[in-house]
Image (tube, grey):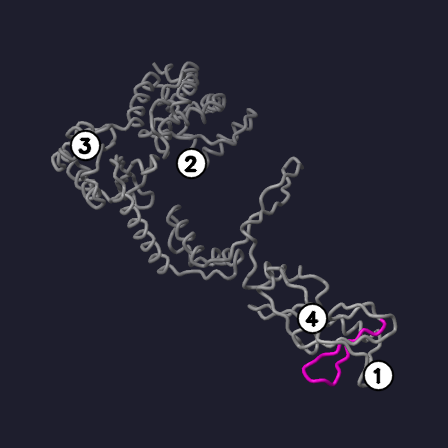
Amino acid sequence: MYKARAKNVVLFLDHGLKSCPYCRGQASHWAVCIRIHDLDGKEEGFLNVLDDPSDVPSEKEELKSDSNAPSTKKRTSDVWLYFEVVMTNGVRKARCKRCKKYLSYNGANGVSHFHKHASKSCPKRLLTNDSSQTKLRTKIELDGSSTLELKEKYKEFDQDFSKRKLVTAIVLHEYPLSMVDHFGFRDFIKSLNPTFKMISRNTLKNDIFTMYKDKNLSLKRLLEHNDSRVAVTTDIWTATNQKKGYMAVTSHFIDQNWVLRNRTLRFYFVPCPHTKGVLAKVLMDCLSQYCLESKISSVVVDNCTANDAMIKILLKNFEKKCLMLKGSFLHLRCSAHILNLIVKDGLDVIESGIVKVIDCVSFWMSTPKRIEKFEKGCRYLGINNSKRLVLDCKTRWNSTFYMFLSALPYIDVLDKLKRLNKRLKFDIPSKEDWKLASVICTMIDVPTFCPQKPDSDDYQSLGYSSHPKSRKLK
């Protein structure tokens, strides 16, 4: 590129080329074309004279200089928001604005490596996919077929978001707070994302209290701005690690969009003994905390005498003008608990068979030596013993159903072990007992799932319980 000795002008030469590399103006074959441009690129005139003909560059030098000339084409790629062109030792390169890394750039090879750096290699991960642009990726199924699915867009790492997820997981699954101090867990999290800063046990405890306060405050606001009536269900839960009783209080209401919602209000510790006065006080404290005394529609409780007496105490504390029909619908008995009582009465028909099955299961599952002997009997008779025997629980009627299901495949094994061990003091079920157990399993297969249905948000009716098979329980 030839620069003439003139003030504020640049002379661009076209020596035997087809066009001027600056303004692309056409030139005659071997004639020297000199176009004069100001610094802004505006053409001012035309000259046919050179200051020094020896300064005319060769065609090879001109091509080399032309490759380093800045392009006048407008840069439309979004990647230029994160890169800038700089000169380093006379070589033009692109520099990342955040990590300051230099990438090669000559204006002719494209910017695909810029996109790769900004979206994957750069520690700051600047470039994200356009929200209006949908990308697909190929997914290989187990049968070898391929399908297209939406490709997940990259999200920038958020320390606070990941910390909230960790706190939620520990609360949800009752993990110990010391879990965040375990070396193996810390190493596992580091392998997922080295930039995540693991919190301490004390920080975790404080975050749990903060999350509880935020959730509790948002729930209070939701109930405060909701104008509909609120139904409440109560149940006594036992903590697995503390062996203490807690009252779970759940609210059910219709929101402004006419959608049925339920929210757990609190888990209240209930001191022993669980008398009517203690239960009534705990429930009243919960309702008062959320200002539900004037919005209450009904209280759903288990069908027992202690709850009946508790409801009578609540009726005395509530203003009857705030209740529906002066409290006529305040007390509702839990349908799942009533179903539990019905099925238990039906199981009394085979009470003797249930006791025999319980004796067999509890005996052979009590010690490792007996379990090993039971498995040896299964292998001797060629019976698959992958499913373990399940013991009955007196407070859960469906556990009897699961006990029968687990014991029915091992009828021959239990009979064989009894005949080989005549000193056993318990009796094994007879063929008639096993037959009744098999019939009972087919009869209560459908109702066993009924208590799970009312827990869903969109549950509005008990009409599902009139299944054709449920009539056979009669």
User: In percent of the image, x 37 and y 54: which residue is there?
Assistant: 177
Question: Foreground: 273 or 210?
Answer: 210
**Residue 285: mark:** none
Question: Foreground: 469 or 90?
Answer: 90
Estimate the spatial distance between the alpha carbons at disc 1 and disc 4, rounded to whole Å: 26 Å
Quadrant (top left, top right, bottom left, bottom right) of the N terminus: bottom right
Estimate the spatial distance between the alpha carbons at disc 3 and disc 2, rounded to whole Å: 39 Å
Residue type, mark 4 in image:
Pro
Q: Position of residue 146 (x, y in %)?
A: 65, 39
User: In percent of the image, x 41 and y 60: which residue is there?
Assistant: 199
Callout 1: SS? helix
Residue type, mark 3 in image:
Ala
> Earlier along the polypeptide chain: callout 4 or callout 3?
4
Estimate the spatial distance between the alpha carbons at disc 2 and disc 4, rounded to whole Å: 84 Å
**What residue did someone put label 3 on?**
306
**What residue did someone put label 1 on?**
53
> Earlier along the polypeptide chain: callout 1 or callout 3?
1
Question: Foreground: 8 or 255?
Answer: 8
